[in-house]
Image (spheres, grey):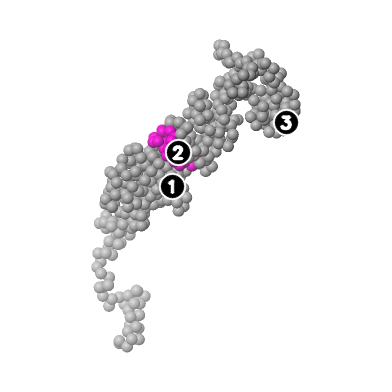
Amino acid sequence: MPKADLTLIQSSPTEIREMNLNWFRLQLKDLEDSTDGIPMPDTHRHNTEVTLGSLTFARVIEIINGYTVTFENGSYAVNLVGANSNVGDKVNVNNVSVRSQNSAGLISSPAIEYASFNGGVIVDANSGITGTVFPRGTEQMKVNNISDAIEIADYRGFNKIYFYSDYTLGASAELDDYVLQGQSHININLTIESAAEVKDVVISECTVSGVLDGGNSLEKCIVGDITYLNGHVHNSALTGEIKMDGNKDAYFVNCSMSKWGNVPVIDMGAAGQDLIMIQFTGKVKIKNMSGTNKIGIGMAGGRVILEDTVTNGTVHVSGIGKLVDKDGNYIASGTWNGVTIYNELISEDTMADAVWDEETTEHTTAGTFGKAMSDAGSSGNPWATPVSGNTIPGTFGELVGKKLLTLAKWLGLK
């Protein structure tokens, strides 16, 4: 039995590994079914788990026909778990300490096994572990492939997969209605190929790119180049190009751009899909909208850029920010490039328009700036007001008059 095939459960002060006897039994069955193993005598007898009342008593495994077990030599201990067996009596002695846990009342507890998964199966592409026999898929023995993870999850009644390393989901990933969770959106890259089945899937704590199947929800992710997005994106950072599809709405709530200078792009998919963005921060580009789509964006601060390929539909923006074309030109409410625009953003442009286009008749309270401006405007042209009477010492008129008289004398005009 190679040391690497045993589960490491303690490194120091003493190295301890574990061998699940049911897994060991299945390895022996595989050897018996091989071309070389078929002519050989059976390696063991097996009595499966038996449930009496509310208790499930453990399986029994007996090594027979003169076979023995040798563990790879070394200074470590091996715990035999998951069954009663005579493996301890069939061991070829070396430096390995083998610990059998036989008991007349040994109970196999599905509840304990279920709880050890923490609600889902763990995939780590770097683990080197395959198979589905417990404790595979737990923190103790993370499996390295999605096929085994799905089989374990289906058997245990889970619909959640944890990713502990970067992973690419391909044709073997039949994950409709699953929950996929990484350890961190910074450390875990999840790439989804078009052959993967990921409809109505919830993805969190990953950097996500690839092809979705619709109805998805992304939470606390970095969203890269994504195709066929419809569903919800919450509390995430956007980067790359996101293409909508499926004739269904897409919602972005409390999202932002991911990197300064890297402006995310939302491709509206020509026609059929509406877009709602709530509390977006940063810059975002919108392109490829030729149908009667509707876009509603509430900005927490930033800029919405409409590409020339936005040629139809309605765009309604509000909050704090600026709506511009691809050249940075301000877009006001009205019609722009065939698009109906409702611009309710607060920006330097809208603030200036609001001040200078405000009706003065609405500001008549004595002592206010509006009333003073109104009075000044109604007093006529200041440049046409005679200055002859402005000779009171110390006044502005008197000082200007003196300066003009001095200048005239210097020029020889008087």
Return the x and y of residue 56 as percentages of the image width and height.
58, 15
**Upstream in sequence: badge 2 or badge 1:** 2
Residue shown at 60% from the left, 30% from the top: 140
Q: Quadrant of residue 24?
A: top right
Q: Secondary structure at mark 1?
A: loop
Which amino acid does the dot numbered 2 rest on?
Answer: Glu
Q: Which mark is residue 390?
A: none
Percent coordinates x, y for residue 189 in the rendering: 50, 41
- Per the image, is 62 magenta? no
Q: Amino acid at mark 3?
A: Gly
Q: Can you give x and y, in whole percent of width and height, for residue 147 in the image?
A: 51, 30
Please say if 90 is above or below 143.
above
Image mark for residue 193: 2
Using a 10 Å C-alpha cutoff, classify the residue at mark 2 as few (fewer than 14 neighbours), some (14 to 19) or many (20 or more). some
Q: Would you place residue 110 above or below residue 9 in this image?
A: above
Residue 6 position, x and y percent, is: 64, 29
Nearest the viewer among 108 and 393 is 108
Q: Which residues are magenta?
A: 192-216
The N terminus: image quadrant = top right
Estimate the spatial distance between the alpha carbons at disc 1 and disc 3, rounded to whole Å.
52 Å
Bin the neighbour count of mark 3 within 10 Å (Cα to Cα): few under 14, some 14-19, many 20 and up: few
* Residue that mark 1 sits on: 240
Label 2 vs label 1: CA separation?
17 Å
Examine the structure image and report whether residue 205 is included in the region drawn in magenta: yes
Q: Nearer the viewer, residue 324 or 262?
A: 262
* Residue bearing mark 3: 74
Q: Is residue 145 left or right of residue 273?
A: right
Q: Is residue 361 visible?
A: yes
Q: Nearer the viewer, mark 1 or mark 3?
A: 3
Query: How far apart are labels 3 and 2 at the CA level?
Result: 44 Å
The nearer-to-camera label among 2 and 1 is 2
